[in-house]
Amino acid sequence: MTREELLEKVKTSRPAVTVVGLGGAGCNIVTWIADKKLAGGKIIGVNTDASHLSTMTRADRLILLGEKLCKGHGCGGFPERGAEAARENLAEIKEELKDTNLLFLVAGLGGGSGTGAIPVFAQAGREMGALTIACVTIPFTIEMTRREKARDAIKALAESSDSIVVIDNSKLREVAGNLPLKEALSVANALVGSFVKNVTDTITQPSLINLDYADLRAVMERGGIASIGIGEGDGANRVEKSVSQALSTPLLDITDVSSAYGVLIHIVGGEDLTLEEVAVVGEQIMSKVSNTKRVIWGAKVDAGLVGRVRVMAVLTGVTCPFLSGVPKPKPEPAPVIPKEVVKPIRQAMEHIAESYPKETISKAAVFSKEK
Ligand SMILES: Nc1nc2c(ncn2[C@@H]2O[C@H](COP(=O)(O)OP(=O)(O)OP(=O)(O)O)[C@@H](O)[C@H]2O)c(=O)[nH]1
Ligand SMILES: [Mg+2]
């Protein structure tokens, strides 16, 4: 084989990534992703609400769900209608997903369209052979009945998708401070969006060949519920600080961090990030998440982030009290997060929310305990 033929092969063997935003929140989140320019992925906006869907100028494809059922007016908060609407378009959905290897389904749970349609899309994605990752938010505690709907939707998703990355909006407030609603929603958009973007960039960009689709599959396939944590640090022990923050402040309350099945780490640092520091992240995670079978990660250099390290940790196969309905073993008082911890997390969120500057991606590493 010549080098040219090999390069052609690299191009054609790259996994096809599709990101679907469902319902109002889902569409807003994928718009965030489109604004940041997704490397090598197709973006689809999906809604029963024609008016909201028509605002999606950045998507590659749009699907108006359940035209007959909803007449373009939305679902009024009823997930059963959202599911029925999605079933109306099943043939079109399968056609859109047919060559996809990696499918991200993004929604804010609690309404009708996104909540009802997402399990239908997940099932279609799995049937088409895609690694199907749902990325969802749970409504704020004040949205009481909406939280119940979200719980049911996650249970349905557990049957139909590979992994479900869950961000609890209430938890967001806890770690980022008491933000006004609109700001909190933008932070949620940025967090879900950057998870999708980070993972996609890491496996589709040729300079990050060490973290590939097969590695991702090993951690996320049948991975169940997944929780995200982020951390950022500077100065001495900046890596240790950011790792321990990322693990100690998950955006979904989980029962036991140490029993996570798999961990995906994404590290961003300035030009001064060393490979040794990247390796320290691995050691730290392995020591803190002791039963983890698989740890994979990618690291990239962001020229604008001198002196700092930012870590996003995704723990798969976790259990969480919200879903099991079981209270925590030891009810703890509301956590008081020290200011020096809140501040860097907020900074990390602000960084994430900022547009990605032109980044030079130079390093990646994959480590696994189990080969
Ligand atoms: N992250 C994020 N969450 C949002 C946003 N808007 C609403 N939410 C959250 O998502 C939940 C669902 O809202 P929508 O996405 O508007 O609902 P929908 O899926 O369009 O459902 P219907 O409008 O009932 O058909 C809400 O309960 C909020 O918790 C947003 O812009 N960003
Ligand atoms: Mg809506």
Image (spheres, rainbow, N blue to C red):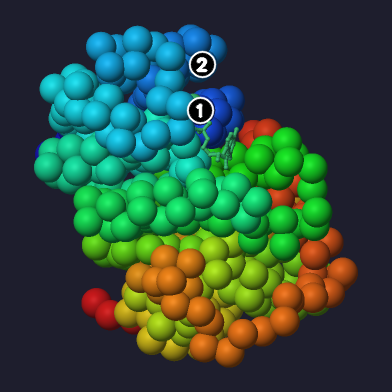
Q: What numbered label is drawn on residue 52?
A: 2
Q: Nearer the viewer, residue 45 or 137?
A: 137
Residue at the image position 84 percent from the left and 74 percent from the top: 338
Q: Is residue 80 left or right of residue 356?
A: left
Instruction: Tell whether 88 sits left or right of 146.
Output: left
Amino acid beneath label 1? Gly
Could you give the CA–CA distance between mark 1 and mark 2, rounded to whole angstroms?
7 Å
For the residue pair 354 and 162, the one nearer the viewer reads as 162
Q: From what the image shows, is residue 143 above or below residue 33?
A: below
Q: Is the residue indicated by label 1 positioned so its CB lies within 8 Å of ligand 1?
A: yes
Establish if 31 lies above or below 288.
above
Give the quadrant of residue 317: bottom left
Q: Please state the horizontal and vertical placement of residue 21, each as a whole percent of the image.
A: 42, 31
- Is the Cβ of the residue at disc 1 closer than 8 Å to that at disc 2? yes
Tell me the crowding category of disc 2: few under 14, some 14 to 19, or many 20 or more residues within 10 angstroms, Cα based.
some
Residue drawn 33% across and 31% down? 82
**Camera-nearest residue between 134 and 312:** 134
At numbered mark 1, what does the secondary structure look like: helix, strand or loop?
helix
Q: Is residue 123 above or below residue 239?
A: above
**Which residue occupies 45% across, 33% down?**
77
Quadrant of the image containing the N terminus: top left
Write down the residue under mark 1: 24
